[in-house]
Every structure is written in C-alpha cells, then in structure tokens.
Image (cartoon, rainbow, N blue to C red):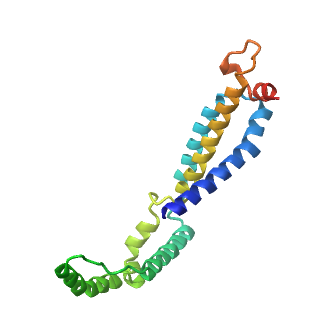
Amino acid sequence: MDDSQKSDAFQHFSQKGAELVNGTVLPKLLSKNLPVRDCYHIIARAKLIFAEKFEKLKYSDPTITKLRKAMLKSLIEDAKSRKVEKPKEKDKEMQEKADRCEPVAREIVDMILDTELLMAYEPIIDTIVSDQEAKFIADLVTIYFSHVDNWLVTAMKENERKANLKKWDGKNPEEITWKDLDNALL
C-alpha cells in the first residue's frame, strides 16, 4: 500500500468513524444519560468484546480454509503478474554482472511463484490458512475502531471543553452526564 492509498484509507475510516460517533454513538449516550467519562470504559469494553469475538473465530473452519486458500492462490497469481524493472547500475562492471545474473534470478522467481508448487504440500497450506495470527478481520476492525475511539474521545473532550465555559450547577466533572453536556451547549 503506497502513501496515497494509506492516506485515502485513513480519510475513509476517519470519515466513517466520525459518522458512526456523531450519528449513532453520541445520540445513544445522550439518550441513556450516561456520565461523560464513561466513554473511556465503553471504548475499553468494546476492545475486549472484539478480542473475545476474534478469539472464538474458527479459522480452521472448512469454509474459511477454502476461502483463504482461494485468496492465497489469488495472491500468488497477483505476485506473478507484477513487473519488476531491471536494475540500472552506475558502474559498467556491475551492470554487466546485473545483466548476466538477471535472467537466472527471474527464472528462479518464476519457478517458485508457481501456484501448483506452492499449494502442493497440503499440511503446510492448511496450517497457513488456518493460522489465527493472520487475522484479516481483526486487523480491519482494529483500523476502523481506532477512528471510532478517536472521534468519541475527541467529541467528549471538545464538548466538555465548551460546556466548561458554562456553569454546572455545582456538579463534579465525574457527575456530568451527556444530557448535561447537551443542555449546556444549547
């Protein structure tokens, strides 16, 4: 993923996180009239719930294994189709060596990037595709949730800062609810 794609992904998840927080989470917190600082507990608990859900996923389930094998084959094919430029050496002697060695290096790569070869030993493929460390869904959810977390904390701090400009009728900060914040900002 290049820097442009990373930037686009960041903007996408940031926007979606803001939409979720502003459109769903904050109204829910307001309707339940929870203490503002409870959002830290809510975020921590959501992370634990995600972790527990992912622990219970059965990566060795036959359907998941079949899909991951198909994905692995697709990745191999994609890698095979990628073009790699020949090296350009400044030194004439080094360029001659690069030119001499390049065809053999490319042949080796082509031989190894063979789907049948790489997928031939079923036990290792089963181990790879059922490896829980390759948590595609967990990684994706973590990226998205980090933006939800950020937007929720930002909303809390910004609204709390604005509301602090008004009086709280003697309430301590930990007693301030989302309705108090809403009323103070009206």
In depth, the one of 162 and 125 nearer the eye is 162
- Identified at 73% across, 29% down, the residue is 34
Q: Where's residue 178, x and y in %?
A: 75, 29
- Identified at 60% across, 41% down, the residue is 150
- Which quadrant of the figure has residue 98? bottom left
Indicate whether 13 appears above or below 131: above
Q: Where's residue 65, x and y in %?
A: 51, 69
Of all residues, the one furthest to the top in this rendering is 170
- Identified at 29% across, 78% down, the residue is 88
Q: Is residue 18 left or right of residue 150?
A: right
- Identified at 60% across, 42% down, the residue is 149
- Which quadrant of the figure has residue 161? top right
Q: Which quarter of the image is occupied by the C terminus?
A: top right
In depth, the one of 50 and 94 nearer the eye is 94
- Which quadrant of the figure has residue 103? bottom left
Of all residues, the one furthest to the left in this rendering is 93
Indicate whether 38 appears above or below 101: above
Q: Where's residue 21, x and y in %?
A: 70, 43
